[in-house]
Image: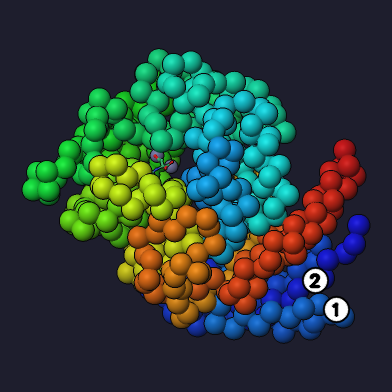
Amino acid sequence: MTAQPGFLIRGARLAASLTERGAELATAAPVDLRIADGMIVERGSGLAAADGERVIEADGLVALTGLVDLHTHLREPGFEQSETVLTGTRAAAAGGFTSVFAMANTLPVQDTAGVVEQVQALGDAAGYATVRPIGAVTEDLAGEKLSEIGAMAQSRAQVRVFSDDGKCVHDPMLMRRALEYVTTFGGVIAQHAQDPRLTEGAQMNEGALSSELGLKGWPAVAEESIIARDVLLAEHTGARLHICHLSTAGSVEVVRWAKARGVQVTAEVTPHHLILTEELVRSYDARYKVNPPLRREADVLALRQAVADGVIDIIATDHAPHPIEAKECEWDAAAFGMVGLESALPIALATLVAAGHTSWAELETLLSQRPAQIGGLAGHPSALEPGQPADLVLVDPSGTSTFDLDRLQGLSVNSPYLGMELPGKIAFTMRRGYLTVDAGELVDTATVAAAALTAGARQDTATEVAA
Ligand SMILES: NC(=O)N[C@@H](CC(=O)O)C(=O)O
Ligand SMILES: [Zn+2]
Ligand SMILES: [Zn+2]
């Protein structure tokens, strides 16, 4: 086992110490972090670089624990023309993520121990991010029979999150049984809340605009009624429920009510639902076609407020790559979904931190700490302090990110922000003590794979010693 070069990160501001909303960066003291063998080994100020250590000057940068996405579509196996585990995790690293949870709607579906282990192994080998597969709730996402939940939980992938995302678990009896099952090992069901009968053929948010445009509408109640049912089922079973991509003001009210009752429910919002509205559908540009649909401005404002109030627990990207053919066509025929890993942090900075809705510390909770807790992510640092794994990101808040075709790292380019320049730039991403983004540039595939191999070997040795 060869030792990896260590790092001394000098003069970063810790997001965790910027607890006040609207606080200037300068109000946090600059901090030095020493990294060796995949871990943070020292924290202080005025630390001197040791022999062979690389110094990263982080003056003006904000340090957060590595971002964690609880909702990513990596598309492998089965849809490798849209994304692969490698390309998707490259996009993740470029966006500051060190861990992603991979949704189950692959082909074959992630509904057996074999498939989830395969996806996890592809992630380990690529090395750009920790990949935690999500297991399907029902076999083949068909909504008829529970999948091998226990076998996936006990597999090497140790699945803790189960979801039929893309589809709603509509049968209340199956939902009840799934909730009961996952409580036995501390798992969680992540529901794609969409009543299928109320949204048959739906193309956009239902309202005045859908009538005007002559597109079949997708009523808010289709989402809210499923959330209402499921929080009651979660209460009845004492299970943990997570709501994917909440998108309406009414959904916020239901979750607020459930949390006040003590129901174990958590909720996520996507960056796009925090900034884009249904008005964009007027363009008939299918990049704006997404599930759930872009809603009214009043919903966007209610979602931001719900993040500020803590009713919404996390931001998750719902990174949903689709090939150009699936988007450059008529609105009705286009696929639902947009890519989001690389734009998540800039959008969150613009809509939440810059707008004074959250502090940097709260942002770290929303994009790193809470998703890790909800997903039961082992080996994620709870803080940037000695003894913690070196999964972290250094953000330049005064820099900008451009979303040009040649900058996006994923295989698909169905981003609503193409050609735009957004505030905030990922300067460095570090996973297990090695860099995946170095001075704003993604580190190449071979270098990252080699570093991951070394880090993996180190971890295996540590496990053997502990055993
Ligand atoms: N969000 C989307 O519009 N699409 C997702 C499915 C989903 O998240 O429901 C996809 O898999 O393409
Ligand atoms: Zn979904
Ligand atoms: Zn999704």
Residue highlighted by disc 2: 6
Q: Which mark is residue 52?
A: 1
Q: Quadrant of ligand 3?
A: top left
Vertical relation: 38 (above or below) 20: above
Question: Looking at the image, what colour scheme do you see?
Answer: rainbow
Q: Residues within 10 Å of mark 1 (few under 14, many from 20)?
A: few
Residue 326 visible (yes or no): yes
Asked whether the beta carbons under mark 1 and mark 2 sit within 8 Å of each other, the answer is yes
Label count reads: 2
Which x, y percent locates residue 75?
53, 43
Near-viewer residue (356 or 446)? 446
Residues 369 and 450: in front is 450
* Left or right: residue 164 compared with residue 199: right
Query: Which image quarter holds the N terminus?
Result: bottom right
- In the rendered view of the protein, which quadrant contains the C terminus? top right
Which amino acid, mark 1? Gly
Residue visible at 68% across and 66% down? 444
For residue 219, side relative to residue 355 (left or right): left
Q: Residue at x 67, y 68 (%)?
A: 443
Residue 265, percent across and down? Answer: 42, 36
Q: Calculate the distance from the C-alpha at mark 1 to the C-alpha at mark 2.
A: 7 Å
Q: Quick one: SS at disc 2? A: loop
Q: Is residue 98 above or below residue 400?
A: above
